Image (spheres, rainbow, N blue to C red):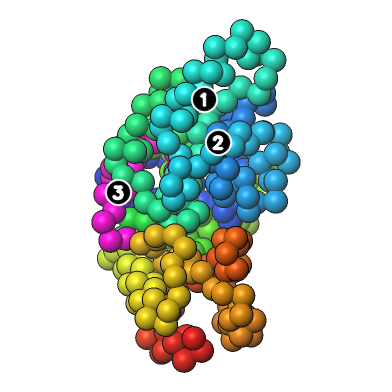
Amino acid sequence: MDRIRQACDNPDAEVFFLVGGTQTNTTVINSVIDSFQGVIAVDSGHINTHEAGAVERNGHKVVALPAAEGGKLSAASLGSWLDEFFADSNYEHCVIPGMVYITFPTELGALYTREEISAIYDVCRDNDLVLYVDGARLGYGITADGSEIALPWLSGHCDVFCIGGTKVGAICGEAVVFTHGNAPKHFFSRIKQQGALLAKGRLAGIQFDTLFTDGLYFKIARHANEMAYKMRDIFVAKGYEIAYESKTNQQFVLVPESRLGHLLENIIFDEWGHDGCGNTICRFVTSWATTDADLQALESVL
């Protein structure tokens, strides 16, 4: 915990370890907002698309707003929606927003700027909303080329965020950071009630202690990003088009239907939809373990 506080340059931060990403999101949301409140996210946001309705299962509606370019939440659209919502004299009959949820980076690998997050945080504070930043892939966002965000800055510009361990090589575990000594009362008990408490809690602690010793967390993430840039160049050199601009370890490639079957037989990746022009949008992800030999094997398949 102390290493994370030091990395955030925030001695007032309260740090908790949970089992996995979905449990982390549901536990934070369920603990911070009231039963009649919902959480605002973009329509492509992780809690709205890839968590099997876990937030709703816990009794909180996800209010999905249209995403801006790259899957970002726009402060302007958020503010407009809130103004319209509270202008309705019957709003207390509705699900009242209590939290705003964003991911850094976004589901499409886009990076928020400092100005963009600051603007969102201003809207949240003006409307008494909690800003929660899902950092399951936080390391990849912080170490991406052109990123403006570092842990100390983020710690001062949101109310709570998480640091993903699983996606940077940990066996399991996410760290939740309440940035202003603002953890809900009895949050540990809430973690346990949500089934998010690891019985052998020392395992998570040891992993994060290791990840935040000598900058290992950032070295791992930076390596994966560098491998992703090389991978992107391989795809481009082979004539593939890039679907979304991403500076993280997730790269989104347009794969013609005629080539899709061959790639599926030889490479593990995700199908991410279609572009309406005969191509499948595919997500290829590098990691702490990706090597140049892996990329050479990919190139030979392509």
The amino acid sitting under disc 2 is Leu
Q: Is residue 187 visible?
A: no
Image-quadrant location for residue 263: bottom right
Q: Which residues are magenta?
A: 144-162
Which residue corresponds to mark 3?
A: 149
Type of the residue with mark 1: Trp
**At label 3, which amino acid type do we have?**
Ile
SS state under label 1: helix
Q: Of 215 and 251, which appears nearest the observer?
A: 251
Please identify the residue farthest to the right as the structure is shown. 57
Dot 2 surroundings within 10 Å: few (below 14), some, or many (20 or more)? some
Closer mark to the observer between disc 3 and disc 2: 2
Q: Is residue 42 magenta?
A: no
- Label 2 vs 1, first from the N-terminus: 2
For the residues marked 1 and 3, what is the alpha-carbon distance in whole angstroms? 26 Å
Q: CA distance from mark 3 to mark 2?
A: 24 Å
Please state which of residues 107 and 136 is positioned toward the viewer in this rendering.
107
- Of callouts 1 and 3, which one flags the residue occurring earlier in the amino acid sequence? 1
Question: Eyeballing the image, is 92 above or below 137?
Answer: above
Neighbourhood count class around disc 1 (C-alpha, 10 Å): few under 14, some 14–19, many 20 upward: few
